[in-house]
Image: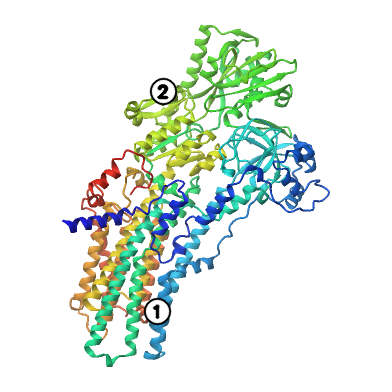
């Protein structure tokens, strides 16, 4: 019993690999360092290439620990031509130096010295203008780690300790073989090993180099950010890399400040500097404190800034340059497979030592029997060969390619996902998405097209289609509506060459287009009054307000927002003549009915209102919460995206639940959710109701919940927390600054590429480039594909490991010789490592993946099904190889002088073809039919073809180097037939049922099970 408990303890400790776990999001430097210490690797340079550089990360963290007072750019004094009357040194000295800023006449004076025409016109923006500014002040790019060339990957591949040892063995074999066997025969063994080592190095380096090129493309995509600038009087979008000193940049909520600069003007602007300084306290830029720094985030409000420093002349540029050297975090699956590789490698080391010991002992016993006085120099060659075999067993046993197969699969998947409109920012998201059990999605832009238009309007007593509004509205009423639309907006209309360019969110552009349709002049309305205060739209109050001073000296507040919220604040309504009349109860009921009717037609409803003030309001509120006059109710149409319903159905089929979280009112949300097939027989509640749920109500209703309407960002965060507490793997979509906490807390944060702010994108794990829910489902499909592909490769590789180790060890014990030589084992290692990863880790996703339930948080990576397949194939291969080894000559009537060489070649050939057909078996872990879509995977077919052709070349033409002899047609047929039979064996093995309980659970103690399953807390992914 004690022995059994000890075996159980060892098995459990081996498989749990507690040291090889990291959280899937934002691991600490200590966690990243921890698993490396326990790793057993023969080539740490290659093994750790796609992991974070902890030392560089630490240096970058230290760079961030400075105070804002020392942010001045330490640029050298550069002589500036007559055009620019200010130097880089002076621009750097301005930072946080209010006295110098005032002496230079503030932003206006500095703008003139930078040859900015005016803050309403911007720089000239011509090609020569841009070139001169780049020449004098630099470009907005930071220095990055240089791209590695192919020869560096060759050098990395040569760092493998066992390959170095084998190369030394080859040199010794040459040094001993040539003197003892002559120049004509003595060089074969040594050169054979050297050529094999060279082949391994070349193929490994080529594979790694191809991966690096794919990652480079993805890195370039991650850095694409557009900014809005004012050039030659026109507002335009440009790449952040094209920004120059002197540019006027427009900032709005969620933007990243693209360069160092000075505040010009703005409303309620709040800047978060934690990304640069680590300080969580936001700052409020103003004309007195105008300094803005690259890399900080606009948390609220809007404004304009003058760019004074770009690229490496900013502290953000220096920090990003250092961070680029730190590399990406490794994924949890990479770390787990490093653990598997370490365990298997240590077992392989033990087998290698045992095999070498057995071979040496048998050799010494034989020499002792015949007498050491008969010692020959060829015996030294035998010892070198024994050592080479032992080292090669270690090469085969340590699956260096196992963690790198994850990288290969992720690189391939990420490249393909770019075509499917998904950009992965965090590698771990790719594999985690395959485990997702819940998707919490926004409505606007994700389920809908985000191409909004005002369809219906109630205004001045008329409820009509928007296209007919200009025919029925009187002048005064029309003016009030146009004023409300044009003054109370975060968007903009730029008139360039008799053309109106409308900027802003889809909702803002829909309203601004309505104002233009009604004949309004944006510039005339804007110039008719002075903007005093702005309260930007936020997700909590669900409204936006402005306070303006009119030409007659009076003040007016405009308000727009969620219909039911603004309507409650109204006690007057605008009549047909544009006058304000008291809002009676009956009229209010009628208006509420209009709001409901619009909502039931799946229209987004907004109310527009105003209130006049005789003098400047004393309170800080931009618009009072009562006493408003209702101007209009608008119904905005946002059509459902084509294909969304099918994508939702596919999620439900795949066991992934979908919950829509939206700021729209309940009726609109339910109408859209029904149309998308999200709301079926579940619950639809409003955010305030959801927040008030008790723990008992949460347990009862959480998994029935399908729609949350009138939600705030805190509702989304709360939903994530509650689902994770139930061990769900949660994916969340978000586009706004306030979504950042939910995106950060979720297992997979998905930001919108079109409508998403830079704050949301920087927090997310993946960016949906087309804002389409269908693309999210494609990520889930690819995530499952990555996970499954790695499982296939692990199943294939562990089978080869078990058979190769066992056959050589048992043969060494039984016969004193190993049937597989060093060169042969190196070829087998190439088949199962680099070529196996290429063949199996790059399988494209297929529809059947979405017919399985998600793995979830508690799923095991190496499943019972995989163990069944591994053991079934290993037993079959060992039986046929042992039968050939011990009875092959008799059964196949192999005789003659080369009987032993022929038999060993037949064993080697049969072993390789078993792996070729088992590679086909590994394509499907459950289904008997393993040939589905095989003809569509060109890389898989190419790898198989290369393996078969090169195997034939080794056997028939490279026998002197590989210790093989040419085989007869009969023996070739036997080898291929024995390999082919592995397909039949796999079909039979797959009919064997397996327990649902993971096999390693049987080795765990009761206490361990309780600790793992019954702690009632959220378990970080992955859990295997």
Residue farthest to the right, as pictured: 82
Q: Please say which color scheme the image uses.
A: rainbow
Q: Are marks 1 and 2 in contact (CB under 8 Å)?
A: no
Task: Please tell me which residue is depicted at 41% across the width and 80% down the height of the picture.
Answer: 170
Secondary structure under the numbered disc 2 in the rendered image: helix
At label 2, counting other C-alpha atoms closer than 10 Å, the crowd grade (few under 14, some 14-19, many 20 or more) is few
**In the figure, 117 relative to 141: above or below?**
above
**In the figure, 244 relative to 442: above or below?**
below
Q: Is residue 188 left or right of residue 462?
A: left
Return the residue nearer the eye: 43 or 439.
Answer: 43
Mark 1 sits on what residue? Answer: 169
Mark 2 sits on what residue? Answer: 689
Image spot of residue 501 (x, y percent)? 67, 33
Image spot of residue 1014 (x, y percent)? 28, 40
Image spot of residue 707 (x, y percent)? 41, 28
**In the figure, 938 relative to 660: above or below?**
below
Considering only order in the chain, which callout, 2 or 1, is on the residue closer to the N terminus? 1
């Amino acid at each position: 019993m004690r022995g059994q408990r000890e075996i159980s303890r060892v098995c459990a400790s081996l498989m749990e690999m507690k040291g090889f776990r990291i959280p899937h999001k934002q691991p600490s430097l200590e966690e990243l360092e921890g698993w490396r210490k326990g790793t057993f690797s023969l080539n740490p340079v290659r093994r750790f290439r796609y992991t974070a550089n902890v030392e560089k990360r630490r240096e970058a963290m230290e760079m961030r620990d400075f105070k804002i007072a020392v942010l001045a750019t330490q640029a050298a004094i550069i002589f500036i031509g007559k055009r620019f009357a200010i130097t880089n040194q002076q621009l750097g000295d301005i930072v946080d130096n209010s006295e110098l800023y005032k002496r230079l006449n503030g932003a206006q004076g500095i703008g003139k010295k930078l040859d900015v025409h005016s803050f309403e016109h911007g720089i000239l923006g011509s090609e020569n203008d841009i070139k001169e500014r780049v020449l004098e002040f630099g470009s907005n790019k930071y220095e990055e780690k240089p791209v590695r060339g192919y020869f560096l990957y060759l050098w990395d591949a040569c760092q493998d300790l066992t390959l170095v040892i084998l190369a030394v063995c080859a040199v010794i074999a040459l040094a001993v073989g040539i003197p003892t066997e002559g120049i004509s025969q003595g060089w074969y063994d040594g050169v054979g090993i050297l050529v094999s080592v060279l082949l391994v190095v070349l193929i490994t380096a080529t594979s790694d180099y191809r991966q690096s090129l794919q990652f480079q493309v993805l890195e370039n995509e991650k850095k694409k950010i557009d900014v809005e600038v004012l050039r030659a009087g026109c507002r335009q979008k440009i790449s952040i890399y094209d920004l120059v000193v002197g540019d006027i940049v427009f900032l709005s909520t969620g933007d990243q400040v693209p360069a160092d600069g000075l505040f010009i003007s703005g409303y309620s602007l709040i800047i978060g500097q934690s990304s640069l300084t680590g300080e969580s306290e936001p700052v409020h830029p103003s004309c007195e404190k105008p300094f803005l720094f690259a890399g900080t985030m606009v948390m609220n409000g809007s404004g304009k800034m003058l760019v004074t420093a770009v690229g490496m002349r900013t502290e953000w540029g220096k920090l990003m340059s250092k961070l680029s050297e730190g590399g990406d975090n490794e994924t949890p699956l990479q770390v787990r497979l490093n653990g598997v590789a370490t365990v298997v490698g240590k077992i392989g080391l033990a087998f290698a030592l045992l095999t070498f010991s057995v071979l040496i002992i048998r050799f010494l016993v034989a020499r002792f029997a015949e007498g050491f006085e008969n010692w020959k120099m060829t015996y030294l060659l035998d010892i070198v060969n024994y050592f080479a075999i032992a080292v090669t067993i270690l090469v085969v046993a340590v699956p260096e390619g196992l963690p790198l197969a994850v990288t290969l699969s992720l690189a391939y998947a990420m490249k393909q996902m770019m075509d499917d409109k998904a950009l992965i920012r965090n590698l771990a998201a790719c594999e985690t998405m395959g485990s997702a059990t819940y998707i919490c999605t926004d409505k606007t832009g994700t389920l809908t097209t985000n191409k909004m238009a005002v369809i219906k309007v109630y205004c001045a007593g008329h409820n009509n289609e928007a296209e007919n509004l200009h025919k029925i509205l009187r002048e005064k009423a029309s003016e009030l509506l146009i004023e409300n639309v044009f003054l109370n907006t975060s968007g903009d209309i730029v008139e360039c060459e008799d053309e109106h360019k409308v900027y802003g969110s889809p909702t803002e552009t829909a309203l601004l287009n309505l104002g233009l349709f009604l004949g309004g002049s944006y510039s005339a309305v804007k110039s008719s009054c002075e903007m005093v205060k702005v309260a930007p739209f936020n997700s909590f109050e669900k409204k936006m307000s402005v306070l303006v001073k009119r030409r007659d000296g009076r003040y007016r507040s405009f308000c727009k927002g969620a219909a039911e919220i603004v309507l409650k604040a109204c006690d007057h309504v605008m009549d047909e003549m544009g006058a304000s009349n008291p809002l009676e109860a009956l009229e209010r009921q009628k208006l509420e009915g209009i709001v409901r009717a619009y909502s039931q037609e799946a229209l987004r409803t907004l109310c527009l209102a105003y209130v006049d003030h005789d003098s400047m309001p004393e309170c800080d509120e931009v618009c009072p919460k009562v006493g408003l006059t209702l101007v209009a109710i608008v119904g905005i149409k946002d059509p459902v995206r084509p294909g969304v319903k099918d994508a939702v159905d596919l999620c439900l089929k795949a066991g992934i639940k979908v919950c829509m979280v939206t700021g729209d009112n309940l009726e609109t949300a339910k109408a859209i959710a029904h149309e998308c097939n999200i709301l079926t027989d579940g619950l639809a509640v409003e955010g305030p109701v959801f927040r008030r749920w008790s723990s008992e109500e949460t347990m009862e209703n959480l998994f029935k919940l399908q729609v949350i309407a009138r939600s705030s960002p805190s509702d989304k965060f709360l939903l994530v927390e509650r689902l994770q507490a139930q061990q769900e793997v949660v994916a969340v979509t978000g586009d706004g600054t306030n979504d950042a906490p939910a995106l950060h807390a979720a297992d997979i944060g998905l930001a919108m590429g079109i409508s998403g702010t830079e704050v949301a994108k920087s927090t997310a794990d993946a960016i949906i480039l087309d804002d389409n829910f269908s693309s999210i489902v494609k990520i889930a499909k690819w995530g499952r594909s990555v996970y499954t592909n790695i499982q296939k490769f692990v199943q294939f590789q562990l089978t080869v490991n078990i058979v190769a180790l066992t056959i050589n060890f048992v043969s060494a014990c039984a016969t004193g010789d190993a049937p597989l030589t060093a060169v042969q084992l190196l070829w087998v290692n190439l088949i199962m490592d680099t070529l196996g990863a290429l063949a199996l880790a790059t399988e494209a996703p297929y529809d059947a993946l979405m017919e399985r339930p998600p793995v979830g948080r508690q799923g095991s990576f190496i499943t019972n099904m995989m163990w069944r397949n591994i053991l079934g194939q290993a037993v079959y291969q060992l039986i046929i190889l042992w039968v050939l080894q011990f009875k092959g000559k008799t059964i196949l009537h192999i005789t003659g002088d080369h009987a032993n060489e022929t038999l060993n070649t037949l064993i080697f050939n049969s072993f390789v073809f078993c792996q070729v057909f088992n590679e086909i078996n590994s394509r499907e872990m459950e289904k008997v039919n393993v040939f589905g879509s095989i003809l569509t995977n060109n890389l898989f077919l190419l790898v198989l073809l290369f393996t078969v052709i090169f195997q034939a070349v080794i056997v028939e033409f490279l026998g002197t180097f590989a210790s093989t002899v040419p085989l007869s047609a009969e023996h070739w047929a036997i080898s291929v037939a024995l390999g082919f039979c592995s397909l039949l064996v796999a079909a039979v093995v797959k009919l064997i049922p397996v327990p649902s309980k993971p096999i390693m659970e049987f080795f765990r103690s009761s206490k361990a099970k309780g600790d793992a399953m019954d702690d009632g807390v959220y378990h970080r992914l992955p859990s295997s």
